[in-house]
Amino acid sequence: MPASRIRKEAVPAADRGLDVHRLRLLEGFSAAVSEHGYPPLTIAQIVKHARVSKRTFYEHFADKEECFLALYAEATELLRRGVEHALKAPAASWQKQLEAGLDAYLSGLEQNPALTRACLLEIHAAGPRALELRLSGRAKFATLLREFVERTRREHPDLRPLTATMATAIVGGIDELLLVNVEAGLTSRLGEVRETSVELLRAVIGVRA
């Protein structure tokens, strides 16, 4: 995510009156789940990291699953905005623009190890609603990639078109590379995935023979 903490603008407008406690809870959850893992995680551990009471927790969330879903949705949306901005910013070439979008994604993840571990690894243990949200998040990034390719092909029609299926495969493939690092405890080295990811993107999107 683009900052080491979840930023205020990620909180829905309807919740702004409660944003301080809500942010503490989301940040507390990411720290607690990174330390304990999702299945054994307790509300007591979450509120301890968040420095709020259990009463405050239940004023915002029904249970730990709801808290996790909110954390994932808001963190993913922040990251998506950062990637979208990078892909639309002026660059020397479409290749550089594409790399900027990838860098926004990777650096955002690298800057918050606890949140990255929660969103890439612990999400698998959080049940079917979490899986559905994860797939929805991937679909949004795949759409961003397709929109970038469509815009770029207006000026560079020799580039290959990108299907929805291929875009989903690319996003999923990059996430799997990241997951390997997170599982190995190498959250601070996610940028090393960059070279492989760039090669993959250029191979798929590059100029047609």
Image (tube, rainbow, N blue to C red):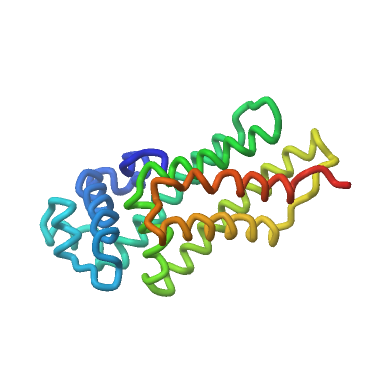
Pinpoint residue 35: horizontal percent, then vertical percent. 25, 60
Q: Is residue 84 above or below residue 71?
A: above
Q: Is residue 136 above or below residue 8?
A: below
Q: Residue at x 64, y 27 (%)?
A: 91
Q: Is residue 136 above or below residue 93?
A: below
- Residue 32 found in image quarter: bottom left
Q: Residue at x 26, y 57 (%)?
A: 29
Compared across the picture, whether 32 is left or right of 79 comes to left
Query: How many labels sit on residues?
Result: 0
Q: Residue furthest right?
A: 209
Quadrant position of the N terminus in the picture: top left
Q: Residue at x 41, y 55 (%)?
A: 73
Pinpoint residue 185: horizontal percent, then vertical percent. 37, 56
Compared across the picture, whether 6 is left or right of 140 comes to left
- Residue 45 found in image quarter: bottom left
- Residue 169 found in image quarter: bottom right
Q: Residue at x 64, y 47 (%)?
A: 145
Compared across the picture, whether 82 is left or right of 16 comes to right
Pinpoint residue 43: horizontal percent, then vertical percent. 18, 65
Compared across the picture, whether 102 is left or right of 42 comes to right
Pinpoint residue 120: horizontal percent, then vertical percent. 43, 59
Closer-to-camera residue (154/113) = 113
Q: Is residue 146 above or below residue 138?
A: above
